[in-house]
Image: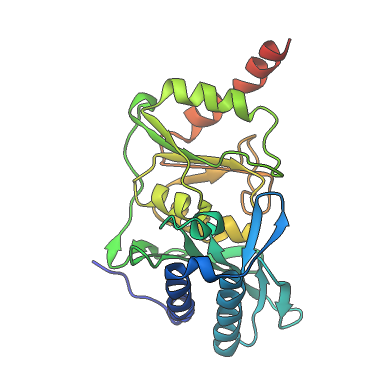
Amino acid sequence: MVGSRSPLINVMVRAAEKAARTLVRDFGEVEQLQVSRKGPADFVSSADLTAEKTLRAELSKARPDFGWLMEESGKGGAPDARSRFIVDPLDGTTNFLHGVPHWSISIAAETDNAIVAGVVYDPVKDELFWAERGQGAYMNSKRLRVSGRRQMDLALIATGMPFKGRATGPNYGAELELVTGEVAGVRRFGSAALDLAYVAAGRYDAFWEYGLSPWDTAAGVILVTEAGGFVGEVDGGTNPVFGKSILASNGDLGRPMRELLARAKPAAKAKAG
């Protein structure tokens, strides 16, 4: 049964749905988009910029007392605000530009340095993931719970692999090799916000990646925690939104995943030596 959506969640959902309309239109005409590079294999399109403009206008109109942190335009909004929105207008831009229907809009609300609400919207599949602190996590009208799998050999794990110009963990190759040898499967779908939403929904049992930005992870983190999961950093840190890495899992596989990834450091050294 669906939970009661607060006014804050409704503001975020309405903004995401409005931005989604232009993104879906542009997705159908992707060959006509203007595209530029922010770095090697790191693209920004007119679709990203238009969606962010829509989100900024909608969120600022509804919550003028909020600040914001957005992927393309950085920080702004009300100065000295206690609350702000953290926004990725198009998570999975490379998928989008190649016609792959796996991308999302991610919006989180942060108050006093804590993430209090999150929305991840996949308009192609019409799947709206949302959560609010203490109120649970949902997809559309369905309550979400992380998976109950306790065995690594039954687990489906998601990750974000390095690409040109993107730094990653120094032992990532060894990590991937170790994880692949221990689990039922590893997936790399190209949208960290959806990877985290899928952990919350029990579709993936765990997810790890390095070098993400707050707009990639903030909404997904509260989805996982409100669905009963675990979120931290690969090395044991506790700041996955602003840290250097993220590890999310169901309640049982967080420790085994962290221990498995820790084994990659000596394995990488042995291979190099």
28 with respect to 210 (left or right): left
- The correct choice, above or below, for 204 with respect to 10 in the image is above
- Give the position of the N terminus as an image quadrant: bottom left
Name the residue at 49% across, 66% down.
30
- Give the position of the C terminus as an image quadrant: top right
Total numbered badges shown on the rendered structure:
0
> Residue 33: in sight, yes or no?
yes
- The correct choice, above or below, for 273 with respect to 230 in the image is above
Asked where in the image residue 247 lies, by quadrant, the reply is top right
- The percent position of residue 151, horizontal first and vertical second, equals 35, 27
43 with respect to 150 (left or right): right
Q: Nearer the viewer, residue 11 or 110?
A: 11
- The correct choice, above or below, for 177 with respect to 1 in the image is above
233 with respect to 248 (left or right): right
- The percent position of residue 42, horizontal first and vertical second, equals 66, 54
Asked where in the image residue 185 lies, by quadrant, the reply is top left
> Residue 213: in sight, yes or no?
no
Name the residue at 71% across, 14% down.
272
57 with respect to 76 (left or right): left
**Residue found at the very far right of the displayed protein:** 79
- The percent position of residue 94, horizontal first and vertical second, equals 55, 55
**Residue found at the very far front of the displayed protein:** 31
Name the residue at 63% across, 45% down.
238
